[in-house]
Image (spheres, rainbow, N blue to C red):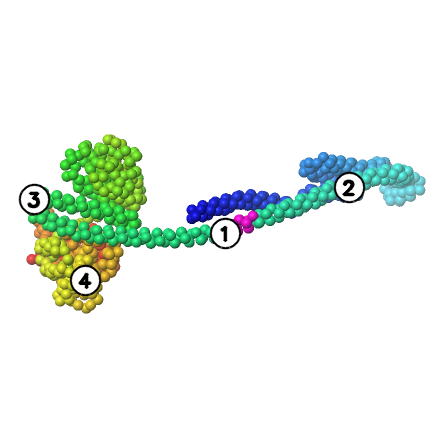
């Protein structure tokens, strides 16, 4: 029945989903069509909103036709050539506009109308030209004779004047005294006797004018008839032009009305499409809403299931973490004793069979610790709890040291180890320990699966910039090789290339290495063929380091001699107590042992200690409970530094230990030098806070002036010693100021300044202390660096006092 319901729900779900798909497609098509129609309607409206250019052309044609009329009338009244030029220009413009209008039409009837309009305008222009010509000819014929006679008038007058002058000269020679009288008499006689030439011309002109008037009267009726006929013909053409223009305008207006009707029809179609689209969209929305409600209901059920699964996964993860923590604690506790006592025995055992056996024990314990760390690292990587450190380190030194670790293992199998590090930078910034871990895994696998031949570790530069470098690190062997179909498998956890390999390891090494390479944002490549060897290739990015930073290990410093210190140790494991007792025997340290938390609390309440080392997990009171009670009270050891000793790997427990009041946390199995360094730093802090001379620090005034004496005389030696004292004192004060201002770069610079004078004096202890400060300036806290500066000052003061003697 349940299966039947499930099938029905699945069928219904399929139907709903199919309906949604079909409806979505239909709505998409309807929406697209509605969009197209709407877009067309908008385009049509835009076109309709624009001005009708054909109507504008027709108006311009009408304007030029009227302009022709105006210009020809003006010419009739005043025969200036400009009016004729304007008339012709208007005629040309009208013809150009008609041609443009004609090009806009496709219908034959409209093209015929345009041709008719052009013809009528041209014919009317001819009639107007004839009218102008008739007026001009009439005026010229009527006045032509008068013009000739008027032009001859100056000549006739000149001849008459010449005749008078001749007569005057003849009379002048006879009798001068009667000149005026005779002249007067002659003028009178001439006036009465004969008419002058001017009078004759005047009479002729008047006669010609009278004749022209008569001729004009005779031709008047004929001219008026011709003019009347031409004007009527011009008016006919004018009316026809107006009719054609009106026909064209009517056609354009009719086209506009038809266009509006088309837009209305398109709007109706668009409205219908929009209604259909809206209806379908509403249906889709309704079905989607129903589907979503159904989905929300199912999703709630799924979320409940997921929450339950998440809860179970978290409980499983917590159980896994607790299991790993407990397993780590149970394994690391005995390993601490095994490793610790083995190291102590190796210090005192002479070379021989027993020492060889101890070396085997040490190697086996280290291997066991390596396997345990692999499991824990794998767990952390899966939980994304591993973060890479960014510190400068010597790349070549790391590669060489890593290769040297496997020299004995390779010798046992008769393998040849090769290295090639040409062209790589000396110093880079990155996670030295994780890079070492990757290469260790690759080298270990290469030697393990290579029965004969060689193993080669090489490094080269892939790309390089001013600040960054990409390195290619390769581990190549002549071993058994890996088949192509197995190469991806070996990077999976707990997997081996073959079943036979499962006895040779856990299968975590390459899986961890691959995850670490990914954490570096690098690449992991493999090139291998069966029986042809294998090459594991790493492409890793690093930041270049321009400065040389020496890593000065605490075991090599030998600057601090622990003495006169009272230490409380609380641990429920007897062999751990015995191991600490053995370590402290080499120092002047008073050790008080307790076996549980209750005894430790009682001792802390009654005795004064310089430092306390408490196991976190103890019967009775745990180490966390003990330190909380001591810190909460105002007893003798409320401010005493305390170190938590634990075999756990849980980060949460580490944080809890520090939060409860512990100053430091040290994991088992611990390194002897690391423990002594913690004790040195924490006790020095306490002594510095109390402003008393640290009794655990013993000045070693070690120096040698023989080198200076070889270089010069006594005055030279005195001068160098004086320079050493003044410069060192000044640098020590600058170091203290740098601590106050928290300037790490100044610490390195001042330490660098102090080193040359100290080397000249062969002050080995002071040189080591300065080198240590220079190397740790970027890594340690300012409290720890303050302790180093106090040690430098103590050594300097000891040398200064010795130089006085």
The residue lying at 83 percent from left, 37 percent from top is: 134
Q: Position of residue 27 (x, y in %)?
A: 55, 45
**Residue picked out by circle 1:** 290
Choose the circle earlier in sequence order: 2 or 3: 2
Comparing 203 with 52, the one in front is: 52
| Magenta range | 280-291
Instruction: Tell me the mark number nearer the camera, choosing from 4 and 3.
Output: 4
Figure disc tally: 4
Count residues near mark 3 (Cα–Cα under 10 Å), then give few for <14, some for 14-19, many for 20+: few
Instruction: Tell me the mark number nearer the camera, choosing from 3 and 1.
Output: 1
Count residues near mark 1 (Cα–Cα under 10 Å), then give few for <14, some for 14-19, many for 20+: few
The residue lying at 26 percent from left, 47 percent from top is: 378
Separation of disc 2 and disc 1 at Cα?
70 Å
Separation of disc 3 and disc 1 at Cα?
83 Å
- Whether pointer 2 and pointer 4 mark residues with C-beta atoms closer than 8 Å, the reply is no
Separation of disc 2 and disc 4 at Cα?
123 Å
- Asked which secondary structure carries label 4, the reply is loop
């Amino acid at each position: 029945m349940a299966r039947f319901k499930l099938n029905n729900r699945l069928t219904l779900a399929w139907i709903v989903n199919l309906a949604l798909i079909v409806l979505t497609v239909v709505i998409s098509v309807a929406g697209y069509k509605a969009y197209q129609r709407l877009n067309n309607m908008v385009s049509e409206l835009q076109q309709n909103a624009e001005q009708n250019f054909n109507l504008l052309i027709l108006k311009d044609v009408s304007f030029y036709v009227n302009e022709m009329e105006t210009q020809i009338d003006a010419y009739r009244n005043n025969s200036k050539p400009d009016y004729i030029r304007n008339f012709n220009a208007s005629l040309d413009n009208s013809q150009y506009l008609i041609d443009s209008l004609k090009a806009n039409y496709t219908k034959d009837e409209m093209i015929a109308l345009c041709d008719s309009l052009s013809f009528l305008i041209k014919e009317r222009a001819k009639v107007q030209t004839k009218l102008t010509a008739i007026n001009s000819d009439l005026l010229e014929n009527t006045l032509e004779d008068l013009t000739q006679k008027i032009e001859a008038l100056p000549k006739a007058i000149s001849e008459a004047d010449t005749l008078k002058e001749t007569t005057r000269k003849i009379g002048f020679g006879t009798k001068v005294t009667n000149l005026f009288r005779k002249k007067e008499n002659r003028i009178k006689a001439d006036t009465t006797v004969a008419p002058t030439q001017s009078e004759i011309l005047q009479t002729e002109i008047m006669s010609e004018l009278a004749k022209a008037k008569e001729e004009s009267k005779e031709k008047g009726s004929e001219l008026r008839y011709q003019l009347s006929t031409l004007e009527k013909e011009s008016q006919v053409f004018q009316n026809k032009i107006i009719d054609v223009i009106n026909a064209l305008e009517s056609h354009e207006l009719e086209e506009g009305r038809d266009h509006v009707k088309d837009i209305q029809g398109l709007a109706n179609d668009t409205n219908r499409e929009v209604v259909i689209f809206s209806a379908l969209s509403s249906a889709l929305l309704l079905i989607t809403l129903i589907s979503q409600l159904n989905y929300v209901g199912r999703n709630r059920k799924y979320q409940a299931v997921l929450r339950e699964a998440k809860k179970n996964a978290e409980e499983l993860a917590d159980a896994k973490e607790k299991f790993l923590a407990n397993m780590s604690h149970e394994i690391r506790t005995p390993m601490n004793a095994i490793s610790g006592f083995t190291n102590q025995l190796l210090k005192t055992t002479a070379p021989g069979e027993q020492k060889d056996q101890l070396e085997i024990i040490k190697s086996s314990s280290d291997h066991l610790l390596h396997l345990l760390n692999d499991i824990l690292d794998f767990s952390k990587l899966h939980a994304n709890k591993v973060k890479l450190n960014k510190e400068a380190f010597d790349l070549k030194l790391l590669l060489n040291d890593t290769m040297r670790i496997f020299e004995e293992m390779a010798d046992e199998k008769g393998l040849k180890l090769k290295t090639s590090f040409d062209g790589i930078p000396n110093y880079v910034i990155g996670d030295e320990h994780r890079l070492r871990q990757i290469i260790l895994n690759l080298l270990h696998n290469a030697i393990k699966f290579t029965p004969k031949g060689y193993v080669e570790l090489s490094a080269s530069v892939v790309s390089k910039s001013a600040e960054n470098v990409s390195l290619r690190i390769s581990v190549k062997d002549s071993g058994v090789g890996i088949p192509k179909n197995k190469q991806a498998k070996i990077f999976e956890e707990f997997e081996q290339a073959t079943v036979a390999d499962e006895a040779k390891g856990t299968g975590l090494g390459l899986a961890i290495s691959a995850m670490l390479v990914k954490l570096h944002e690098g690449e992991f490549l493999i090139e291998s063929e069966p029986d042809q060897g294998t090459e594991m290739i790493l492409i890793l990015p690093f930041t270049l380091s321009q400065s040389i930073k020496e890593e000065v290990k605490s075991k090599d410093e030998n600057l601090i001699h622990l003495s006169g210190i009272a230490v409380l140790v609380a641990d429920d494991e007897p062999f751990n107590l015995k191991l600490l007792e053995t370590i402290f025997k080499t120092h002047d340290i008073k050790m008080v042992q307790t076996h549980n938390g209750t005894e430790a609390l009682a001792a802390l309440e009654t005795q004064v200690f310089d430092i306390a080392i408490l196991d976190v997990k103890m019967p009775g009171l745990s180490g966390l409970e003990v330190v909380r009670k001591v810190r909460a009270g105002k007893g003798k050891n409320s401010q005493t530094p305390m170190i938590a000793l634990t075999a756990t790997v849980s980060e949460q427990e580490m944080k809890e230990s520090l939060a409860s009041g512990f100053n430091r946390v040290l994991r088992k199995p611990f390194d002897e030098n690391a423990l002594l360094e913690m004790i040195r730093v924490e006790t020095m802090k306490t002594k510095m806070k109390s402003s008393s001379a640290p009794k655990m620090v013993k000045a070693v005034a070690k120096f040698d002036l023989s080198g200076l004496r070889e270089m010069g005389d006594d005055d030279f030696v005195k001068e160098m010693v004086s320079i050493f004292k003044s410069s060192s004192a000044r640098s020590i004060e600058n170091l203290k100021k740098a601590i106050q201002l928290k300037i790490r770069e100044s610490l390195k610079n001042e330490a660098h300044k102090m080193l040359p004078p100290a080397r000249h004096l062969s002050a080995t202890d002071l040189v080591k202390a300065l080198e240590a400060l220079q190397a740790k300036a970027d890594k340690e806290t300012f409290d720890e660096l303050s302790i180093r500066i106090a040690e430098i000052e103590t050594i300097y003061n000891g040398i200064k006092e010795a130089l006085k003697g």
